[in-house]
Amino acid sequence: METTSTAIETHLGLENPQAPGFAPIPWEPKPEGCEDVMWRFSGNPILTWNPIPRGARIFNSAVIPYEGGFIGILRVDYKNGRPQLHLARSEDAVKWDIEHEMIQWENEAGEPIQNSYAYDPRLCKIEDTYYITWCDDFPGASIGMGYTKDFKTFVKAENPLMPFNRNGVLFPRKKNGEYMLLSRPSDSGHTPFGEIILSHSKDLTYWGKHRHVMKNGGSGWWQGAKIGAGSIPIETSEGWLLFYHGVSHTCNGYVYSIGAAILDLDEPWKVLWRTRDYLLTPEKEYETVGFVPNVAFPCAALYEEDSGRIAVYYGAADTNTAIAFCQRDELIDYIKSNSEV
Ligand code: BMA
């Protein structure tokens, strides 16, 4: 019988209490003896090779709580090598029921449109609307933006920024009536440079007041080639907590690691603290072996304010989807005392 979606069975290790109306986020306590501030889910990878018909790999994907469960906007690379976005649903954010057909977009006039490719989605709730940003074909790599209220109708908006650009990450609330978007100006290929910029908009169409946020490099070669915003920033009392990727250019190609920064709450282009050392770098086989070896690429984070638990979703080796955990207060203390801005 034809199915329209695939339920993926994976290991589950959840144990935290359920807040009313919200499903608990995936969580495992830090393993005994682990000295790192970020640790991997023992059930990794949660998605791996050939997860759905025609879909070769799912990675670099976004998740968000929705109606007592979770929604995923997943990057699916097909067996012809091109990526598109698929909707997925989950009760526990570990096992995913994935639509077999790509998301169908319409323009603001209600006419159907198709992206020639779409990858590296981020998913951000602002007020009552869910915004999706991704790497779009403008032509050439650029930031695509769309929105939905119900995950049934998906409307594509104007491309916010000129090409070439990647890693568009919205802030979850407006400031002084303005939306804020992080991005990483790039080329349209395997960009050898890249820094994070913040832009403002009153209407999601016209963007300006561009501010430089973060440079690649510093003394850390792990982020020496380029950096890019990862997850939607998490609001904390210390500032906006942002997970990002840092890239090292080796004689064997790029290596993508995960770092974090804390941005000023009122002026988020000001970096208050930033990890001197990476939090997580490709070490496990599902991170070092795959379509593109040595990639850990964060695109989303689930957060529980009361407990401070954070589950970071990252693509591994452009093949797998994995989760890593950290605890907000421990992480913030760590970033503050091991910071190099
Ligand atoms: C970047 C993006 C990511 C990818 C990474 C490693 O340029 O295209 O989607 O994970 O390269 O291949």
Image (cartoon, rainbow, N blue to C red):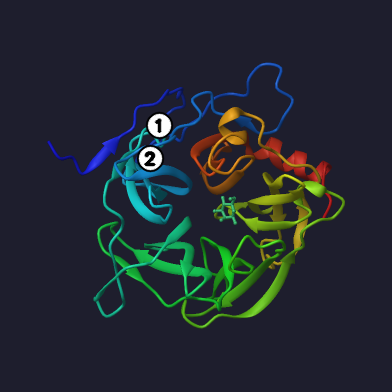
Image position, residue 220 (x, y; %): 83, 48
Q: In the rendered view, does 97 fall on the left or right side of 203?
A: left
Location of residue 8 by image quarter? top left
Front residue of 32 and 244: 244
Query: In front here: 317 or 326?
Result: 317
Q: Quadrant of residue 48?
A: top left
Element on which disc 1 rests: loop
Mark 2 element type: loop
Q: Quadrant of the N terminus?
A: top left
Left/right of residue 6 with respect to residue 73 in the rendered view: left
Q: Quadrant of the C terminus?
A: bottom right
Q: Residue furthest left?
A: 1
Q: Which mark is residue 184?
A: none
Q: Position of residue 29 (x, y in %)?
A: 58, 23
The three-letter amino acid code for the residue at tag 1 is Gln
Between 119 and 214, the one nearer to me in the picture: 119
Residue bearing mark 2: 22
Q: Is mark 1 within 8 Å of ligand 1?
A: no
Q: Is residue 237 visible?
A: no
Q: Is residue 290 above or below residue 340?
A: above
Q: Which residue: 54% across, 75% down?
A: 178
Residue position marked by numbered label 1 in the rendering: 18
Q: Amino acid at mark 2?
A: Phe
